[in-house]
């Protein structure tokens, strides 16, 4: 039996993780979970899975659940609550499926507590990849990718040696506006941006996908997970999201991982690794039915955010922290209808220009840079 602590249980990845747990009751048990503000969903999860510990975003939500589950479930809140869930003594695996850099400290605490990490929260690796990977190495803890592209690469690399890799190729759907020119992006709406062609995901990542910052964050995530220089990480447009990513080896052989788009596959793989289990109600891939798959070179002038992420990743230091925090704030402002779609990249660039780079930021420095960047971007909005 694997005991699971789930951060972000009420979200898109969280709900699909619960699906996996639900369909394998003899393999997995939910011992602790964290949600944000969605108390309704939280209640339903408590009723079905009976976790021992639940964390919510703030004190008012905590009080509400505490009065309902007094004596039955311990209810905590805030960052301390997330940490308590991430370090629950019974947990063997921590699934980090919160959105944003708030996932960083709970991940580090879980690593220090020697938990296996199933990581969906890519912002953690973008904002502090050097600290997280160093902590995982020091504590001999596995960082298992949940992000579909990274799970694909991880699967392709089983039994392989990294010295034989020529490059890895992350596939990108192109997002909701892939068939629009840059000029046509000027007046796009939030509603249009939230219509991803292939995946149903949370709002923030769906916007990231539309700007292709998602792919940029994934390039940085891949750099840290697979210990590869940026020159060995490529992005390829592939509109069907059937090939989840590829590895090209030095002998020119290419291995890819394919499947119908279903996040339960990488989630379950992270939970069962190195084993595999049946996936309930999975739609098998039928290539004959699909017939044709499409591929296209990325135009970096069209996808400015992807270009920025490569530049920032290569420069390193504190720049990825700024890129990530500015992006989180700008995306939130776009979702609130306060800025236009193309202003997202503009705000990120302004935050990067405003910042004085720190070469090897400590955790405290990263937290301060993250907060300062958010403050700076917010000041541009008023
Ligand atoms: N969705 C997908 O298919 C994929 C997602 N990812 C990554 O996984 C992560 C999660 O994405 P996704 O599931 O789409 O996001 P969602 O927005 O659907 O879910 C986010 C989760 O984080 C919780 N949360 C937000 N703020 C807080 C807070 N202050 N304290 C505690 N919990 C909080 C939310 O709680 P509540 O709703 O209760 O407020 C929710 O449970 C992201 O990093 C994303 O990039 C990676 C690959 C695919
Ligand atoms: C499902 C998943 O892993 C997302 O990160 C997905 O990759 C988004 O798709 P694109 O960023 O390729 O549009
Ligand atoms: Mn992805």
Image (cartoon, grey):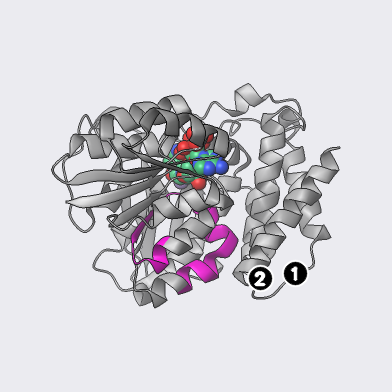
- Magenta portion: prevailing SS class: helix
Q: Is residue 125 magenta?
A: yes
Q: Nearer the viewer, residue 78 or 30?
A: 78
Mark 1 is surrounded, within 10 Å at the Cα level, by few (under 14), some (14 to 19) or many (20 or more) other residues, namely some
Residue 307, given in percent of the width and then of the height, sits at 66, 54
Q: Nearer the viewer, residue 317 or 34?
A: 34
Disc 1 target residue: 357
Residue 358, given in percent of the width and then of the height, sits at 72, 72
Disc 2 target residue: 317
Q: Are marks 2 and 1 in contact (CB under 8 Å)?
A: yes
Q: Is residue 42 above or below residue 211?
A: above
Q: Nearer the viewer, residue 380 or 229?
A: 380
Q: Is residue 127 above or below residue 250?
A: above
Tell whether 294 sits left or right of 57. left
User: Quarter of the image holding residue 352?
Assistant: bottom right
Counting every numbered tag in the picture gives: 2
Q: Residue at x 45, y 63 (%)?
A: 109
């Amino acid at each position: 039996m694997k005991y699971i602590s789930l951060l972000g249980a009420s979200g898109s990845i969280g709900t699909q993780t619960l699906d996996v747990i639900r369909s394998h009751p003899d393999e997995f048990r939910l011992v602790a979970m964290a949600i944000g503000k969605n108390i309704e969903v939280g209640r339903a999860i408590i009723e079905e899975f009976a976790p021992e510990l639940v964390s919510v975003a703030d004190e008012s939500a905590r009080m509400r659940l505490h009065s309902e589950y007094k004596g039955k479930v311990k209810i905590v809140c805030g960052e301390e609550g997330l940490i308590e869930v991430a370090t629950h003594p019974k947990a063997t695996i921590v699934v980090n499926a919160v959105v944003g850099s708030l996932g960083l400290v709970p991940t580090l605490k879980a690593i220090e507590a020697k938990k296996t990490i199933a990581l969906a929260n890519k912002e953690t690796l973008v904002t502090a990849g050097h600290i997280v990977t160093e902590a995982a190495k020091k504590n001999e803890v596995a960082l298992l990718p949940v992000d579909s592209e990274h799970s694909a690469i991880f699967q392709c690399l089983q039994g392989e040696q990294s010295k034989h890799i020529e490059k890895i190729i992350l596939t990108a759907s192109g997002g909701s506006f892939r068939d629009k020119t840059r000029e046509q992006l000027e007046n796009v709406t939030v509603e249009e941006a939230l219509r991803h062609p292939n995946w149903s995901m949370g709002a923030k990542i769906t916007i990231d996908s539309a700007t292709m910052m998602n792919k940029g964050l994934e390039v940085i995530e891949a750099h840290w997970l697979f210990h590869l220089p940026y020159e060995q990480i490529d992005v390829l447009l592939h509109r069907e999201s059937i090939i989840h990513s590829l590895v090209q080896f030095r002998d020119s052989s290419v291995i890819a991982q394919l499947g119908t788009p279903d996040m339960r596959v990488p989630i379950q793989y992270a939970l069962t690794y190195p084993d595999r289990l049946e996936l309930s109600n999975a739609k098998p891939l039928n290539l004959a039915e699909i017939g044709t798959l499409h591929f296209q070179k990325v135009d970096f002038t069209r996808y400015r955010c992807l270009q920025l992420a490569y530049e920032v990743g290569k420069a390193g230091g504190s720049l990825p922290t700024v890129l990530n925090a500015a992006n989180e704030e700008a995306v939130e402002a776009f979702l609130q209808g306060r800025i236009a779609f193309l202003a997202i990249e503009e705000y990120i660039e302004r935050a990067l220009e405003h910042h004085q780079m720190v070469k090897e930021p400590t955790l405290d420095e990263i937290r301060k840079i993250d907060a300062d960047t958010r403050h700076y971007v917010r000041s541009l909005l008023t």
